[in-house]
Image (tube, rainbow, N blue to C red):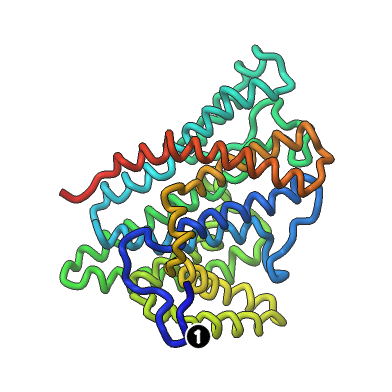
Amino acid sequence: MVPIEGQAVVTPAPDHHNNLTALRWFAAGLVLYGHAFVFLGLPEPLFLQWVPMGPLGVYIFFAISGYLVAQSWERDPHVLRFLAKRALRIFPGLAVCTLLSVLVLGPLLTTLDAGTYWRNEHTRGYLTNMALYITYHLPGVFANNRLPHAVNGSLWSLPVEFFMYLLLALLGLLAAAFKAVSNRLLAWAVGVMALVFMLLAALWAGTTTEALVMYRTDLRQVPMCGVYFLVGASLFCLKLTKYFTLSNVLLALVLWLCLGVQPHWFAMAAWVVLPFVVLAFGLARQPWLVRMHARDYSYGIYIYAFPVQQTLVSFWPEMALPAYLLSTLVITVALAALSWHFVEKPALKLKPFRG
């Protein structure tokens, strides 16, 4: 999996013959793991005293997504086909998850009578999640949990993710106006935008405690998460994968850890180091990890874990952490498998391609 020092960790290979799907599984698992502590009223563990496990999983998702989405744009720089592909990845699974929450989970778990539940405006309002207009409340559901009324708190990242798709498409369209050098111009535009997001995160989003909400989304999360997306995209667009060597990865990690005595600089260095290390490993090839591509349950794990965890803790609020993790993982993976095989994978077959 990892070559000797000086050799590239990544060599050109057919699509999907890498570890990226396994890494997405890992990222989704980190979110589930981190949330488990919160639901049980325990302090969520920090990664290197820097960030909780849940956000770390989200950052890994964004770094991988930036790389792959930039690659998709380069292959077919057509804005409608590009957005259709992105929509087919997000919305079918999200729509089914939302409908199951309203039609099944809500009626079974609400403390209200059926008539009151169905007449409540929040019941209908929950359907706006299918348009990434995020709401977390279903009437009478999880009212007594430690995180009351939160049906699916993980959905907050999806509008941020889709905004990054739109931003990349916009940069691609602007670059396409200069057809002779469009790919080179896009690469530098993505790199400059990554620097802009770093400044926004350092000078605003990472320092203010006041939320700026638009379309029910805390805009602070756009630079905080989007910076990982854009650095991942930059690694592809600027063709920096040639630097994915074992020695470079180790050097980056050592330098990053040396900054641990300065938490502020450590956090900022993570914007570059985390995508670099994640993609260096993700684009390597470990045969048993590569096989996980056929079962990319990561998105399903991400969108189903929160309601599953809330449901179990509503019945057994004092469950031991190991039993809670195991039971929620088994149920969530089962739902994610159904989502992948019967919703997401069939939807992806509808992706438009260049004629």
Please count the marks in the image. Answer: 1
Q: Position of residue 160 (x, y in %)?
A: 49, 52
Q: Position of residue 75 (x, y in %)?
A: 25, 60
Placement of 78 over or under 136, stated as above or below: below
Q: Which residue is rendered at x = 55% and y = 47% of the image?
A: 217
Q: Nearer the viewer, residue 5 or 192?
A: 5
Amino acid of disc 1: Ser
Residue 226 horizontal side relative to residue 319, left or right: left
Residue 162 horizontal side relative to residue 40, left or right: left
Placement of 213 over or under 100, stated as above or below: below
Q: Which residue is rendered at x = 84% and y = 40% of the image?
A: 318
Q: Residues within 10 Å of mark 1 (few under 14, many from 20)?
A: some
Q: Which residue is mark 1?
A: 247
Q: Nearer the viewer, residue 214 or 294?
A: 294
Q: Position of residue 37 (x, y in %)?
A: 75, 51
Placement of 340 over or under 225, stated as above or below: above
Q: Which residue is rendered at x = 64% and y = 37% of the image?
A: 307
- Residue extending furthest bottom? 6
Q: Secondary structure at mark 1?
A: helix
- Residue extending furthest top? 115
Q: Is residue 207 visible?
A: yes
Placement of 244 over or under 6, stated as above or below: above
Q: Which residue is rendered at x = 49% and y = 84% of the image?
A: 248
Q: Position of residue 261 (x, y in %)?
A: 72, 82
Q: Nearer the viewer, residue 59 or 126?
A: 59
Q: Is residue 199 visible?
A: no
- Residue extending furthest right? 318
